[in-house]
Amino acid sequence: MANYTAADIKALRERTGAGMMDVKKALDEANGDADKAMELIRIKGLKGATKREGRSTAEGLVAAKVLDGTVGVMIELNCETDFVAKSAKFIELADRVLAAAIESGAADAEALLAYEVDGKPLSEIVVEEGAVLGEKVVVRRVARVEGKTVDAYLHKTSKDLPAQVGVLFAVDGEGDAAFEAAHDVAVHTAAYAPTYLTRDEVPADIVENERRIADETARAEGKPEAALPKIVEGRLTGFFKEIVLLDQPFAKDAKKTVGKVFEEAGVSPVAFARFRVGA
């Protein structure tokens, strides 16, 4: 007769994020001792870490925090399944990773993983927690954005999962108008996924390639030679509206651009970062 109940199984699953059969086997082996079962799950997970190395990590979450209204930090933590992504254990790990990102000031995932937390590199903690969860867990990326006003926006693509889209947005002004502009554009950015803030940031080779494609397409369509320059510039403008934030029609009012939103608020955008899990 097992020395544990259905409630014990549920509690251990919530602590570890492990599957039901793994939890039951661990409790059987530990004769119902939850702490011992927790240890067995961790040991078993560490032994299987190498086997998990090549697995895909397309699920996970985005977490972010703004410090003093002027510095935003955001991380993406990946796992294999949505079951683990929404587990308390995984969310707790994301909080630890975000705290380490804030403390370390790390500019990339490699530096963040090398940062010591409780006497060991964060990378070791991630592996250990992945062992308990029974999945490959990856700190994919980190972003840090600074400005006089910074807003963080997190969006859930499913009500049953943690946030899977996150945006940090910084502007050079202060006050209610500055914050409202930063927030509204952060929400817009989550939905419209711009790649660049301004046209100047788009690499010249990308622009020239797009110009070439527009020219060749217009010629293939039999457009008049005299009209080609105007047609090409028009198509380039359309291209910029897709990838450049300030050129995009504003989500809340498509009659004006995002650039116009900032102009009306009397502030200028400084920088942004956008993460979508797995993208």
Image (tube, grey):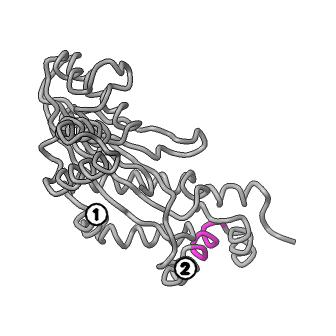
Q: Three-letter amino acid code at disc 2? A: Ile
The quarter of the picture where residue 3 lies is bottom right
The quarter of the picture where residue 243 lies is top left
Closer to us: 24 or 62: 62
Q: Secondary structure at mark 1?
A: helix
Q: Residues within 10 Å of mark 2 (few under 14, many from 20)?
A: some
Closer to us: 2 or 205: 205
Q: Position of residue 172 (x, y in %)?
A: 12, 29
Q: Disc number at residue 22?
A: none
Q: Residue at x 17, y 32 (%)?
A: 269
Q: Earlier in the sequence, mark 1 or mark 2?
A: 2
Against 5, is 24 above or below?
below
Q: Residue at x 72, y 58 (%)?
A: 8
Magenta stretch, overall SS: helix
Q: Position of residue 184 (x, y in %)?
A: 32, 25
Is disc 1 in contact with disc 2, using a CB cutoff of under 8 Å? no
Q: Disc number at residue 109?
A: 1
Q: Disc number at residue 43?
A: 2
Q: Residues within 10 Å of mark 1 (few under 14, many from 20)?
A: some
Magenta residue check for 222: no
Q: Position of residue 59 (x, y in %)?
A: 51, 58
Q: Three-letter amino acid code at disc 1? A: Ala
Q: How many marks?
A: 2
Against 109, is 170 above or below?
above
Going by the image, does 134 lie left or right of 243? right
Against 29, is 188 above or below?
above
Magenta residue check for 36: yes
Against 177, is 131 above or below?
below
Q: Which residues are magenta?
A: 34-41
Q: Residue at x 57, y 58 (%)?
A: 84
